[in-house]
Amino acid sequence: MKFGVFYELQIPRPWEPHTEWQLHHNALDQLELADGLGYDYAWEVEHHFLEEYSHSSAPEVFLGAASQRTKNIRLAHGIIQLTTNHPARVAERVSTLDLLSNGRVEFGIGESASATELEPFGRDFETKREVWEEAVKAVIPMFGDKPVSFDGKYFQMPERLVLPSPLQKPHPPIWVACSQLETIEMAGRRGMGALGFQFVSADAAHAWVHAYYNSITKRLDKLADYQINPNIALVSYFMCAKTDEEARKRSEGLTFFQFALRFYGNSADRRRPPAGTVNLWDEFVKWKDANPDLVEKALRGGLVGSPDTIRKKLRKFKESHADQIILLNQAGKNSHEHICESLEMFAEQVMPEFHADEPAHQDWKRQVMSGEIELEELETNVHKDRYGKTLAKVGPTGPTQAAE
């Protein structure tokens, strides 16, 4: 099993003059630390206009800076919005980063999560999948060494040689965001790595890993002529400390992250309230104060706890054959000091056991991809809750009843 670290660059209000500056530099320090500790991937999102939830609107700049402060960790777009970027600009930026990082880029792509992000760029929620599929078809040939042109419904470009070309040939590995669990099956069918942003249980992971690999081996239907990337990665909340109690005390930001997903995700088209009208942190504090039992339950989930507790939880995930666990602990107001200590403790006391099992996992995957092992078609309908069952149901007007 491999491990990644995940960044939304969350900045809850109130904002001070240097808040964003400090967070960006703290995050780069954390990535440099993670690289030295042996973590495998650094995932950075692209979001626009999502106040407090994500201030990561230029991941190519952030990862470019990270490329000069790290040596081994894979620099992963998780994801680039193909709906709001011209394919040629995407190919140019990804290839440049691949050159600067000596071939360490992972090419994660997606559609964008909300009308709030799409509409300023002239896109709408209803057609975003269609735009994304066309963008995939347009961008892949642009990584090659021959002039290309494209004349589609949403993108047009006269014949040009897109420069530079990436160090990795024919292109960096392709992943797709799976913000809805059903998209994991689609990722397999399209031959792309699946980025599961759902915070699933070990049982759910087992079912969705089977769905993914059965899709890629039995129902492959690529959108273009690209190299397949058979990998499934699952995000988990994360905080490692000496004791379970201390880990939970340090991880309030993880509950804020989950609250924010529900707060915005319940609205039509995931549309955010008008700019500058909601203090999300204040809404979270109101909910937290009114629901202490639910907060406590939420913090018992994910990979939050002592090294021994996290090790036991990860052993269940290992049985599911997930390729990578992506660790999220830059969230809410989690402190830089606690994030660094968590990364260090996990790397020293937990990660070696699971890194040591990677050769066996790769052998299992080889047998699955070759057909030597045929995976059972498992039922996934019982594993479709994106947010977990521990948080209260919330929306733009605040918390309501507890989710079932």
Image: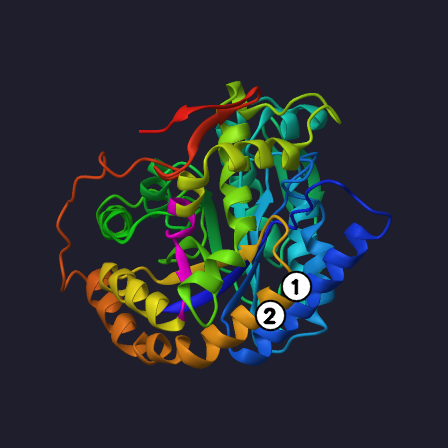
Q: Secondary structure at mark 2?
A: helix
In the rendered image, residue 392, in percent from the top left (x then y), is placed at: 43, 31
Q: Residues within 10 Å of mark 1 (few under 14, many from 20)?
A: some
User: Residue at (54%, 57%) from the top-left corner?
Assistant: 329
User: In the picture, residue 297 is in which quadrant?
Assistant: top left
Q: Secondary structure at mark 1?
A: helix
User: Residue at (22%, 68%) from the top-left corner?
Assistant: 364
CB atoms of marks 2 and 1 within 8 Å: yes
Q: Residues within 10 Å of mark 2 (few under 14, many from 20)?
A: many
User: Residue at (40%, 59%) from the top-left corner?
Assistant: 303
The residue under label 2 is 340
The answer to whether any part of residue 297 appears in the image is: yes
Task: Decide which of 245, 98 is in the foreground and name it.
Answer: 245
- Inter-mark Cα distance, 2 to 1: 6 Å
In the rendered image, residue 127, in percent from the top left (x then y), is placed at: 52, 23
**Residue 141 included in the magenta stretch of the image:** no
In the rendered image, residue 343, in percent from the top left (x then y), is placed at: 53, 70
User: Residue at (24%, 58%) from the top-left corner?
Assistant: 320
Disc tally is 2
Part of the protein shown in magenta: 297-306
Task: Decide which of 308, 214 is in the foreground and name it.
Answer: 308
**In this image, 321 relative to 199: left or right?**
left
What amino acid type should be assigned to the residue bearing mark 2? Cys
The answer to whether any part of residue 167 appears in the image is: no
Please say if 5 is above or below 287: below
In the rendered image, residue 120, in percent from the top left (x then y), is placed at: 72, 26
The residue under label 1 is 336
